[in-house]
Image (spheres, rainbow, N blue to C red):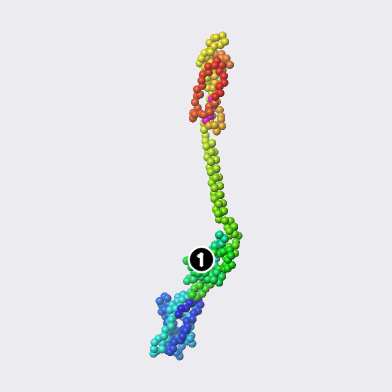
Amino acid sequence: MEVAAISGESVQLQPVKLPEPWAEMTWKVTLDSAEMYRIVTFNKGEHPDLGSSPHFISRVTFHPENLSLQIDAVNKSDSGLYTLEADPRNGRVDITTFRVSVFDRVQQPNLTVLSAHQELGQCNVTLSCSVPGTDRVTYSWSRGTSRIPSDRDRELHGHQSLLHVVIKADSSDTFYSCNASNRASWGADTVDVKPLCNSPATDFFQQVPLWAIVAAGLGLLLLLTVLTLIFLCKHRKKQNSSKDGDPPLTIYEEVEDSRPRRNANGNAQSRIVGNTIYAEINSNPQVADFTVYAAVQRPSSVKKKKINPSLISTIYMEVQEAPSRPRRPQMPRSSSPNPGHLYS
C-alpha cells in the first residue's frame, strides 16, 4: 500500500483487513537509508513492547484496537517500507506492507505573466508557474474548468512551468489556472489575461501595422545617412580651402631699353634706364591676394645723365598661375620710342 505523508505532520498506518487468527503482532521498517528497526511488538493480553530505536523514540503510538501504527512529526528520513507481521504461532505468518513517502507541503504557486502582446488581431501570452523550495512537484494547467493537455506546457529546471497561449478577440474565457502538486499536497493560483491584452501598450502595436514601423525605421536610417554624407563633404571642402598656398607676389623690376634714341634735332641720346615692371603672381585664386614690394636701386649712371621724365614709364603684368617659386618675368623690349602701359 502506498502512503504519502507531509513533512512535520502525523501519519497513521492501518491494515484494511485484520489478520485472523494471530497471537503476536510486530511492526518493522526498512528505511530508504537501508536501516532496519523493530518498532513495536504486541502479544494478546499483554502491553505493547515499543522498540528501543532512537529513530522513533517518543514519536510512535500503537493502537491495539485496530493494530494501527501512528508516527508523529514525520520527516523525509522516515520514508521507507513498513511491514505488519501477524504470527499465529502454528501456521503461516501474514504480512501487510506500507510504502511510506514523505513530501514537503506544496505552497501556493507563483503565477506570473512573462509577456503579453498583440499581433495580427490576437494576443500572445506566456505564463509562468513555480513553487520555490519544493521538490517532486507536478504542474498542470487549466482554462476555466477545462484542463489543458500536458503537451502544451513545458517544465523547466528550478521548479518552474511555462505555458504559451493565444487569446483571440472573441475569446470569452480568459481565466487560466496553475495547479502544483505532489503525492501529499497541492496548491493553485488563477490569473485573468484579458486586461493584459487590452493594455494601452499592446493597443498601440495593434493599431500600427508592422510594415509601417519597419518603413519608419528605414526612413530614419536613410535620413541619417544623407546628413552624414553632407557633413563629410562640407568638412572635406573646408579642409581643402584651408590649405596654405603661395601668396600672390608683386615684383618690381627695372627695365632697360638698350636701343639708342634720338631727340627732335636728330642727335643720339644715351640708353634709357630706370623703367619699372610690376608683376603680380597669383598662386591660388582662393587665397586673398597681397603684394610684395621690392626696392629697386637706380644705377649710378642715371644720376649723371639728364633723362626726360616722359620717357620713363611703368609696366604692370598680372600673372594668373604662379610657379612654386617666383621667377623674373621675361618682358619683351618695347620698340616704341615712348613706352606706354601694358596689361596682360
Residue type at tag 1: Leu
Residue 187 horizontal/vertical position (percent): 53, 72
Label 1, residues with CA under 10 Å away: few <14, some 14-19, many ≥20? many
Residue 220 horizontal/vertical position (percent): 56, 49
Secondary structure mainly formed by the magenta segment: strand
Instruction: Say which of 96 and 296 sits in front.
Output: 96
Residue 18 horizontal/vertical position (percent): 46, 86
Q: Quadrant of the N terminus?
A: bottom left
Instruction: Name the element at disc 1.
Output: strand
Q: Is residue 343 above or below residue 40?
A: above
Residue 16 horizontal/vertical position (percent): 47, 84
Q: Residue at x 59, y 67 (%)?
A: 172
Q: Which residues are magenta?
A: 279-283
Quarter of the rendering containing residue 144: bottom right
Instruction: Say which of 159 and 293 sits in front.
Output: 159
Quarter of the rendering containing residue 89: bottom left
Left or right: residue 228 versus residue 44 is right
**Residue corresponding to mark 1:** 162
